[in-house]
Image: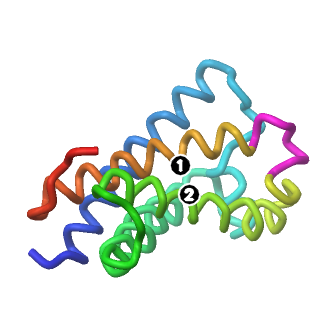
């Protein structure tokens, strides 16, 4: 198994965990206006059900493979730290590029002060899972 394949596997696992947390958040009524699936659906002009496809493609292929390809360049003492650093960069990209295009404003501020905080927490969780699963699928130690 190549590192890119391992990264894609880790990206899928991280995207699955992130997606479950997003569904729990919405079910609990926490920031229902912060719904990345609806944002993606609206940007692409497709139904919300189809919004899950690009969500999983981005998390699995773009971020998973990207993590594997850039792994040696990402600062960090472990794969978990590298996953958090990488997902932090993805969060910044989302805040300055995707949120404004989706109509949520820079850093999602049109959705309120909690939008950047909530998305950062979700990205950190994504990074922890990404780095952990990648480490388990490679010879890298899992230690923090």
Q: Is residue 87 left or right of residue 140?
A: right
Give residue 2's quadrant in the image: bottom left
| Residue count near mark 2 (Cα–Cα under 10 Å), binned few <14, some 14–19, many ≥20 | some
Residue sitting nearer the eye, 141 or 110: 141
Magenta stretch?
108-115
Disc 1 or 2, which lies upstream in sequence?
2
Q: Which residue is mark 1?
A: 123
Q: Decide if residue 69 is on the left or right side of residue 32.
A: left
At numbered mark 2, what does the secondary structure look like: helix, strand or loop? helix
Marks 1/2 in contact by CB < 8 Å: the verdict is yes
Where residue 123 appears, x then y in whole percent?
A: 53, 49
Quadrant in the rendering for residue 6:
bottom left
Q: Residues within 10 Å of mark 1 (few under 14, many from 20)?
A: many
Q: What is the spatial separation of the Cα atoms under label 1 and label 2, in whole angstroms?
A: 7 Å
- For mark 1, give the secondary structure: helix
Q: Quadrant of residue 113?
A: top right
Front tag of 1 and 2:
2
Residue sticking out furthest to the top: 28
Q: Residue at 45% across / 53% down in the picture?
A: 84
Disc number placed over residue 88 in the picture, else none: 2
**Residue drawn where x is 62% and y is 58% of the image:** 91
Q: Position of residue 43 (x, y in %)?
A: 74, 66
Residue 32, x across and y down, in percent = 72, 32
Query: In this image, 113 relative to 34: left or right?
Result: right
């Amino acid at each position: 198994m190549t590192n890119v394949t391992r990264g894609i596997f880790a990206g899928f696992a991280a995207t699955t965990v992130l997606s479950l947390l997003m569904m729990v958040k919405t079910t609990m009524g926490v920031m229902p206006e912060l719904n990345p699936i609806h944002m993606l659906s609206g940007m692409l002009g497709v139904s919300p059900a189809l919004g899950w496809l690009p969500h999983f493609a981005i998390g699995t292929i773009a971020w998973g493979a990207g993590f594997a390809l850039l792994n040696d360049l990402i600062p960090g003492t472990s794969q978990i730290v590298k996953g958090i650093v990488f997902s932090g960069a993805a969060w910044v990209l989302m805040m300055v590029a995707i949120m404004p295009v989706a109509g949520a404003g820079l850093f999602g501020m049109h959705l309120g002060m909690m939008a950047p905080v909530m998305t950062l927490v979700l990205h950190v969780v994504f990074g922890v899972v990404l780095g952990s699963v990648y480490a388990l699928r490679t010879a890298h130690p899992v230690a923090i």
